[in-house]
Image (cartoon, helix red, strand yellow):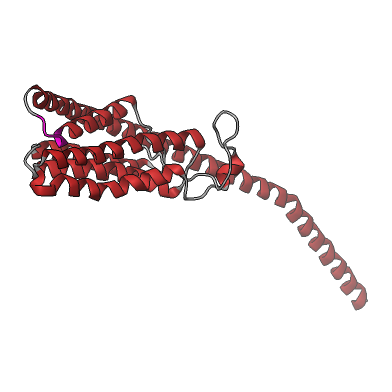
Amino acid sequence: MTGVPASAAGGSGAKPVRGGKLGTAAVNQASLWNIANILTMVRLLLVPGFVLLLFHDGGYDPVWRAFAWAAFAVAMITDLFDGHLARAYNLVTDFGKIADPIADKAIMGAALVSLSILGDLPWWITGVILARELGITLMRFWVIRHAVIPASRGGKLKTLAQGTAAGMYVLVLTGPLATLRFWVMMVAVVLTVVTGLDYVRQAVVLRRQGLAAERAAAAERAEETLRTTAGTAADAAPAAGAVAGAKDVHAAVEARDAAEAER
């Protein structure tokens, strides 16, 4: 879960230009079916498969738990690759922007909730992590009109810690490894809370800056409107005077004609 939608739309047969980047024309011709989006869809399809493998035979068979771990690991790896491909080749689509964060949160949420149902992971840990992810998603929508909150190094480290800890809980571990996975999860929880608070700070700052920029733009438009109105009025004044003068001349001519007619 990187926090920034990465999957996007790829090329319709267009080849990368030198340096591994697609040109603007190629991006404009991009289709929905590109490698980044396909990896995102694979990650979505792995979610129900992972849950079925995890709960197979009551959810405590080490072999099936290992299969579930493999599905979880593949899902997390695709998250890294689709993001890299989308950034490297400008494979951006609206589908990718929506599906990528959904896929990230779906696989992690499925793992945490399933592990808590099985009794392997305390519910408070699942609640803290899911509340943070949902809150940050809503926060992004709150400021999306003004700016996009970028993924930070802390956020990426948090994702790595969460994935590693959840993966260790999926496996049936005992002894020192079971103790280690607990402390890895604690690190993930701390990073989850700290990065979440940092995202809130960024969101508040970006929203304030966005609102200030909007007010400044509105004031500038109002000033420009006043200048335009004043200029139009100034241009109209000589024309109005000319019209008034013409009317006075016409009235004088009519008066003279009337006086001559009486004589």
Whether residue 89 is visible to the viewer of this picture, yes or no, is yes
Whether residue 208 is visible to the viewer of this picture, yes or no, is no
* Residue 161 position in % (x across, y down): 23, 28
* Residue found at the far front of this picture: 63
Residue drawn at (54%, 45%) of the image: 11
Q: In the picture, residue 246 is in which quadrant?
A: bottom right
- Would residue 170 be counted in the magenta stretch? yes
* Residue 35 position in % (x across, y down): 45, 43
Residue drawn at (92%, 73%) of the image: 260
Q: In the picture, residue 141 is in which quadrant?
A: top left
Residue drawn at (27%, 29%) of the image: 160
Q: In this view, does 129 lie above or below 180?
A: below
* Residue found at the far bottom of this picture: 262
Quadrant location of the C terminus? bottom right
Left or right position of 209 against 20? left
Left or right position of 134 against 95? left
Left or right position of 175 against 101? left
Please tell me which residue lies in front, 142 or 227: 142
* Residue 24 position in % (x across, y down): 59, 40
- Would residue 260 be counted in the magenta stretch? no
- The magenta segment: 169-173
Q: Is residue 48 above or below residue 194?
A: below
Q: In the picture, residue 147 is in which quadrant?
A: top left
Left or right position of 179 against 259? left
* Residue 131 position in % (x across, y down): 19, 41
Please tell me which residue lies in front, 109 or 197: 109
Most common SS among magenta residues: loop
Count up the numbered dots.
Answer: 0
Residue drawn at (22%, 32%) of the image: 162
